[in-house]
Image (tube, grey):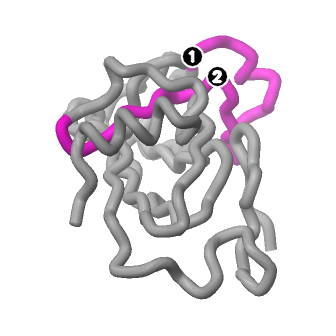
Amino acid sequence: MIKPDRWISAWGRSGGTTPFAPEQVNSASYDVRVSDHWICPTRDPEEFSAPHIKLFPNEVVLASTIERVVIPRDVACDLKLKSTLGRLWVNHSMAGWCDPGFEGTITLELQNLGPEPFVLEAGRRIAQLIFIAMESEPDIAYGEPGSSSHYQGQEGTTRARD
């Protein structure tokens, strides 16, 4: 079952996301914004000190959300790119799932599929979180001893960890 706006607002106000902005609550999702920390495998890191990035055709960049989230043990979370960005040929199709118990910022994998460069500005609403109620809590949630979690507590854009 997908959690509604009432639940999302209560979750946000109780520390589920920092910062929390009531205007980012939708009927069945919560909007998250892109931060100003970018990692691109094909460019010099010095190019990413500005509050925006020009993403060239077919280029991929890692970014992160401004929001730090705490996903409850009885909820899973699906991240979907905002439809406006999809209509501008920006894609996020690699990883978009937060397991129950995840805490931290969310790393985004973004690609420009369009024919022209796309300027992505920090602070833009980039994706939405959809909260899905679990039938019951898992035996071992993300980040708990015995889990295979690599990214618990991550802050900012995070490269792959083995």
- How far is disc 1 from disc 2 in space, using C-alphas? 7 Å
Q: Is residue 94 visible?
A: no
Looking at this view, name the residue that lies furthest to the top.
50
Figure check: 39 above or below 136: above
Which stretch appears magenta?
27-52
The disc, 1 or 2, on the residue closer to the chain's N-terminal end is: 2
The answer to which quarter of the image holds residue 37 is: top right
In the image, residue 45 lies in the stretch drawn in magenta = yes
Question: From the image, which quarter does the C terminus lie in?
Answer: bottom right
Mark drawn on residue 36: 2
The answer to whether marks 1 and 2 mark residues whose Cβ atoms lie closer than 8 Å is yes
Residue drawn at the location 60% of the way across and 64% of the way down: 101
Tell me: 35 left or right of 11: right
Q: Looking at numbered disc 1 in the image, what kind of residue is underneath it?
A: His
**Considering the image in quadrants, where does the N terminus appear?**
bottom left
Q: Which amino acid does label 2 sit on?
A: Asp
Residue 83, image x and y in percent?
A: 21, 38
Q: Position of residue 56 (x, y in %)?
A: 48, 32
**Residue appearing at x 44%, y 33% in the figure:** 32
Q: Is residue 83 left or right of residue 152?
A: left
Q: Which of 45 and 9 is in front in this view?
A: 9
**Residue at 66% over, 52% down:** 103
Q: Which residue is drawn at 54% across and 46% down?
A: 108
Disc 2: CA contacts within 10 A as few (<14), some (14-19) or many (>=20): many
Q: Name the residue under label 1.
A: 52
Q: Position of residue 15 (x, y in %)?
A: 58, 36
- The correct choice, above or below, for 126 with respect to 70 in the image is above
- Secondary structure beneath label 2: loop
